[in-house]
Image (cartoon, rainbow, N blue to C red):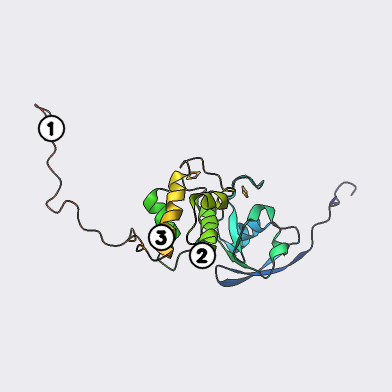
Amino acid sequence: MVGDEHVEMIPSPAKSVWSAEVNGTPVEVLIPSNAVLLDVLRDKVGTLGVKRGCDLGTCGCCTVMIDGVPRLSCLCLAGQVDSTSITTVEGLADGAHLAPIQACFGKYGGSQCGFCTPGFLISAQALLNENNTPSDSEIACAIEGNLCRCTGYQQIIESIQGAAAIHRGEVPLPAAASDPHPDPHPEGPDEPNMPPGHAR
Ligand code: FES
Ligand code: FES
């Protein structure tokens, strides 16, 4: 019957197997030839720590390390980085132990809402891998492609300097939040002062 036939105006892109090492694990997924790396990582590989902010290359939320170099995954075709080694924020920690840069973002308040944080962590780690004595201006240069609307950046710079000191062996890694902490009120909380006339 006329009108029932579906004619594709634009032919679908060919699909092929894409392979890479993501956070140390080999992956192989079937993707269209025009697939964007950000979509592949989030939708096929499942590394949801890679954030989609602007999708335009302006916010840095989608930053991942490709063969050690930070790149914007929203501006990168997956096919261009076939057979590479990719590190997302999920690959920074050593099992249950946070990487120094992650621990320091927590300690120094480098993260507030956290949406930008995966991109900052990757950019910062890429810098620290090359330079564990960065100046503040070298840090500013390394994170210039990452936008944060919460922290004001000073805490992020302090976090990266803190992690650099750990990398240099000058200070130990901060205790993990999950480590047992001493009870700050071993005798129980102080009794509150109630206004006169209020029964407890
Ligand atoms: S989502 Fe890639 S730069 Fe914003
Ligand atoms: S911590 Fe909220 S945007 Fe950076």
Categorize mark 1 by other alpha carbons within 10 Å: few (<14), some (14-19), many (20+): few
Mark 2 vs mark 1, foreground winner is 2
Occupied quadrant, residue 180: bottom left
> Do the numbered discs 2 and 1 sit on residues whose CB atoms are within 8 Å?
no
Mark 3 vs mark 1, foreground winner is 3
Q: Position of residue 24 (x, y in %)?
A: 55, 71
Mark 2 vs mark 3, foreground winner is 3
| SS label for mark 3 | helix
Say which amino acid is labelled 3. Answer: Ala
Left or right, 70 with reference to 98: right
Q: Nearer the viewer, residue 136 or 189?
A: 136
Residue 194 in sight here? yes
| SS label for mark 1 | loop
Q: Position of residue 94 (x, y in %)?
A: 44, 68
Say which amino acid is labelled 1. Answer: Met
Q: Position of residue 140 (x, y in %)?
A: 53, 48
| Mark with earlier residue (2, 3) | 2
Q: Which residue is mark 2?
A: 91
| Mark with earlier residue (2, 1) | 2
Q: Nearer the viewer, residue 197 or 24?
A: 24
Q: Which residue is mark 3?
A: 165
Q: Nearer the viewer, residue 199 or 21?
A: 21
Left or right, 62 with reference to 112: right
Q: Which mark is residue 194?
A: 1
Say which amino acid is labelled 2. Answer: Gly
**Residue drawn at 83 percent across, 56 percent down:** 11
Left or right, 85 with reference to 79: left
User: Between marks 2 and 3, how big is the CA–CA gap?
Assistant: 21 Å
| SS label for mark 2 | helix
